[in-house]
Image (cartoon, helix red, strand yellow):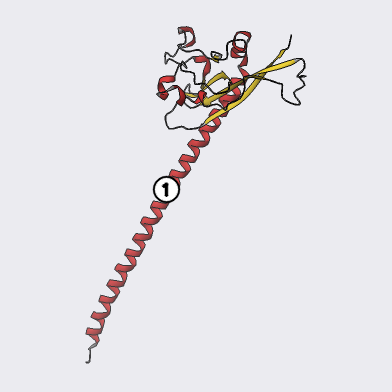
Amino acid sequence: MVFTALEKNNHERGFVLISAMLFLLVLTVIGVMATNTTTVELQIASNDRISKTDFYNQEMGLATAAINSLDWLNGTFVVEDIATARFPKANPTAANDENDNGIDDRSEIKDSAGKIVSIYKVRNLVSPTSAIDSWDDIAAFSAAENHPANQVPEVEHEGKPPVGSGYDPKFFYIKRFVTTVYSPDEGRKVVLQEGTYKAFNRN
């Protein structure tokens, strides 16, 4: 079969049109994939930033609890029965709950904007671990055993001073306590704990 020049041009125009449409389709698919990838990466970066910020807030909570140890590591606290030694107690007084949220203000850590970013609790270390059912914010965790401050390792409350502490076991013994910090925001899962002890004479 013999084609004229005009017929050849018409056939070529159809081929170019199909090629252009396929090329545009490929570009569209690549563009959509690139957009989806960018969106996922932005979400990952955002979640990573939130997680790190939460971790740093809880670290700040541990440091603040240590700085404010005079509030809780006092004579009354350390000589209490091992079943009741905790800070703060449940149901804070009005003087210790100015923001009226049911949580003792002394255990709340706030950022520069005044938002509560960390809460800390201090309790004795006992073996076996016993759940304390009277934390001031126990209702937020539905059950005592779910509260972060009750998720502590099983360690004896009283014992010998650590090796290298400078306290001779013949003359001193220690009582162990643990500080637990956690975020008040739901979905923030960072919980940090730090142990401490106080030495006593054996007389």
Residue nearest the viewer, comparing 95 with 159: 159
Q: Is residue 24 left or right of 121 when viewed as pictured? A: left
Q: Where is residue 56 in the image (x, y as percent from the top left)?
A: 55, 31
**What amino acid is at disc 1?**
Val
Q: Quadrant of residue 127?
A: top right
- Res 111 visible: no
Direction front: furthest residue? 128
Residue nearest the viewer, comparing 8 with 155: 155
Q: Quadrant of residue 17?
A: bottom left
Q: Is residue 138 left or right of 179 when viewed as pictured? A: left
Q: In which quarter of the image is residue 184?
A: top left
The N terminus: image quadrant: bottom left
Q: Which residue is drawn at 59% across and 11% down?
A: 77
Q: Which residue is drawn at 47% across and 10% down?
A: 92
Q: Position of residue 153 (x, y in %)?
A: 57, 28
- Res 197 visible: yes
Residue nearest the viewer, comparing 50 with 104: 104
The C terminus: image quadrant: top right
- Residue designated by label 1: 40
Is disc 1 surrounded by few (<14), some (14 to 19) or many (20+) residues within 10 Å?
few
In this rendering, is residue 180 above or below 22? Answer: above
In this rendering, is residue 79 above or below 48? Answer: above
Q: Is residue 166 left or right of 176 when viewed as pictured? A: right
Q: Is mark 1 on a helix, strand or loop?
A: helix
